[in-house]
Image (tube, helix red, strand yellow):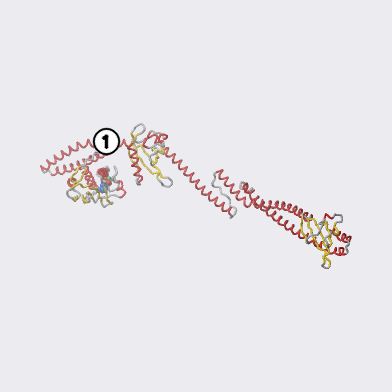
Amino acid sequence: MFSNLKDTPIQRKLMSVMLLTSSFVLVLMCGAYLVFEYYSFKSNIKNDVSTLGIVIAANSSAALAFDSQQDATEILGALKANAHIVSACLYDESGRQFARYPSTISAQDVPGKPQKSGYRFESGYLIGYQPVLQNNERMGTLFIKCDLDAMNDQILRFLLVGCVLIVISLFAAYLVSQTLQRAISAPILALEQTANMISKDQNYAIRAVKTGKDEIGSLTDAFNHMLSRLEKQNLEIMESEEASSKLAAIVETSNDAIIGQTLDGVITSWNKSAERMFGYTADEMIGQPISKMAPAERADENKGILARLSKGERIENFETERVDKYNKLFYVSITVSIVRDSLGNTIGVSKIVRDITEKKQEEIRKNDFIAIVSHELKTPLTSIKAYLQLLLGIAKKEQASFSINALSKAEGQVKKMTSMVQDFLSLARLEGGNIQINKVPFELQLLMQEVVDEAMMLNTQHKLIYNNCGSIIVNGDRDKIGQVLINLLSNAVKYDPDGGEIIVSCDQTDGKVRISITDHGVGISEKDQASLFDRFYRVRNEKVKTVSGFGIGLYLVATIVGYHNSSIKVRSSEGAGSTFYFDLDVIGS
Ligand code: ADP
C-alpha cells in the first residue's frame, strides 16, 4: 500500500494520509471504549447478581430451617424478575438439592453439589455460589446462573453505533481534509505547472508565484533563483551562438584565408578564401596535418611560429611565400594568433593569410627599376667624378681659386649622389635577396678615419670631432660598415642644420667596440624612434620637412648591422640631438 503511495498524486497522497490517520485514531478510540465497556459491564452484572444472591439467600434461610421446600421454591421464583437468570438451586446444609428455579428444570440442569463460594464467569455465563446463613450458622448454599445476553446485546449495539460514527467521522474528515490538503498541494502543483510550462515553451522568463514563507516558499525562491540563472545562461548561450554565427559568416566571406589548427598542426578550420588561395577544399584539409600542404621547411616554419607565440611574441604581417595545390607560387602576409579554451589553455592557433602577390610583384618591379637606374647611374657618376678630380688637379696647379672652389663643391655633390646610388643598389639587392656580406678582418680605426676625413672635406659648416680609439681589428664587411658610417654621419650633418658639433667615437669594452655618432641637431621624438629603422620611414614635422631623403638610409644601416650580429640603437630627445650607436666584435688589436 505504502509503496504505491509514492507514485500517487500529491493531492491523493495527502488525503490518504489524513484519512488513514483519522481512521486509525477513531478505531483505536472505539476499541478502547469497547474494552472499557466490556469490563465495566461484567463488573456491574457481577454486583447485581451477587446482591440478588445475597437477598435470595437471606430470604431462603427460614425455608431451609423449617425444611419447607414449597417456601424455598416460591422464594426462588422471585428470580423471575430478572429475565437473564437462567437457573438457580438451593442446597441444604448437607449439599443436597433442596429447591430449583425454574421449577421445571431437572436435577441435571444444575450442579449436583454446591462448589466454592463466590461469583465467576464460566462458559459464557456468570455463576455464583452464595452461602445461606442464619445467626452466622450455615444453613445451605444458593446457586445462581445468569446469562450474558444483555452484555452481548450492548456490545453489539455499541459496535453498530461505533461503525456508523466512524463512517460519519471519516466522511467529515474527508470533507475537511479536502480543504486542508489544498493549502499544501496547491503551491506544489503551481510549482509543477510552472516547471512544465518552462520545459514546454523553453521560456525562462516565467516565475513561480510564492504563496507563503514556509518550506514551499523557500523552495519557490530557490526555484525562481535557479530560473534566473538559467535565463542568464540561456541568454549568454544565445548571444554567443549569435556571435559565433556572425563570426562564422565573417570568416566565410573574408577575402583573407582564415585557417585554424591545433598545436600539433592538424587543421580545424578552412574558409572559402583558403580554398580559393590554396586550391584545396575544406573537406580535403580539415582533420589533415598542415604538412599535407606544406613542404618540410614549412613544417619547421610552423614550429618556429609556435615557439615565438609561446614566448608571448606577436606575429603580424609576416611575409613569406606559399605554393598552392597546382604548384603555383604566391606571396602571402600571415598574422598568427593563439586560440585558447574557456580555461585559458592554449589549444591551437588561427592564421589569417593575405595574398600579397600583386603588391610583391609591384615591389619587385620597383626594385628592379631602382636597381637598373642605379646601376646605369653608377658608370656616368664614376666618370664624372674622375673628370672632376682631373679638372680639380689642373685648377690646383693653376691656383685658380674660383675653379678649385666650384669643382670641390661639384665633387662633393657627386660623392653624395654616389652614396645615394649605393644605397639604392644595396636596397634593391637586399629586397631581391642578393645582398652579399663578405666578412674579413679589417682595421676599424682606418675605415673610420677615412669616413671622417671625407665628411670633413665635404662639410665645413659642422665641427667634426673624432675620438680615435687606436688600432682595433674587427671581422666584417668593410664596405658595408663604411656605408653604415657614411649614412649615420651624413644624417648627423643633415639633421643638424645649425652646424653644431658632431662627435664620432669608438669605445672598447669586454671584447666589443662601440661605435657612436652624436649630433646636437633636431633630435627625434620617442614615437618616431619606434619606426625609425623601417623601410621608407621618414619623420614628418616642421623642422625636417625641407630636408630631402628617401627613408632608406637607416633601414640599410639596421640591416647591415644586423648581418654583423649586432643592432643599431638610438638615444635622442627632441631639440637636443641624437646618438646612434652599435657594437662590433673585436678580434684583435
Ligand atoms: P632620410 O634621411 O633619407 O629621410 P633615413 O632612413 O636616413 O632617411 O632616416 C630616417 C628618418 O630619421 C629621417 O627622415 C629623419 O627624420 C630621421 N633621422 C635620421 N637621422 C637623424 C638624426 N641624426 N637626427 C634627427 N633625425 C634623424
Q: Residue 230 at x, y = what percent?
A: 51, 47
Residue 406 picture quarter:
top left
**Front in this rendered view, residue 385 or 285:** 285
Q: Residue 15 at x, y = what percent?
A: 65, 50
Q: Residue 547 at x, y = what percent?
A: 26, 45
Establish if 267 lies above or below 493: above
Residue 457 visible in rendering: no
**Front in this rendered view, residue 20 or 367:** 20
Q: Is mark 1 within 8 Å of ligand 1?
A: no
Residue sticking out furthest to the left: 397
Name the kind of residue labelled 1 in the image. Answer: Phe
Task: Determine the residue positioned at 56% across, 45% down.
Answer: 198
Establish if 526 lies above or below 288: below
Q: Left or right: where does residue 365 sit relative to residue 465?
A: right
**Front in this rendered view, residue 11 or 67:** 67
Q: Left or right: where does residue 180 sit relative to residue 519?
A: right
Q: Number of numbered discs present?
A: 1
Q: Residue 325 at x, y = what percent?
A: 36, 32
How many C-alpha atoms fall within 10 Å of the one at disc 1: few (<14), some, or many (≥20)? few
Q: Left or right: where does residue 291 sit relative to residue 174?
A: left
**Front in this rendered view, residue 156 or 584:** 156
Residue 20 visible in rendering: yes
Residue sticking out furthest to the front: 94
Establish if 60 lies above or below 326: below
> Which residue, given by chain and number where applicable, does mark 1 sit on?
369
Tag 1 secondary structure: helix
Residue 135 picture quarter:
bottom right
Residue sticking out furthest to the bottom: 135
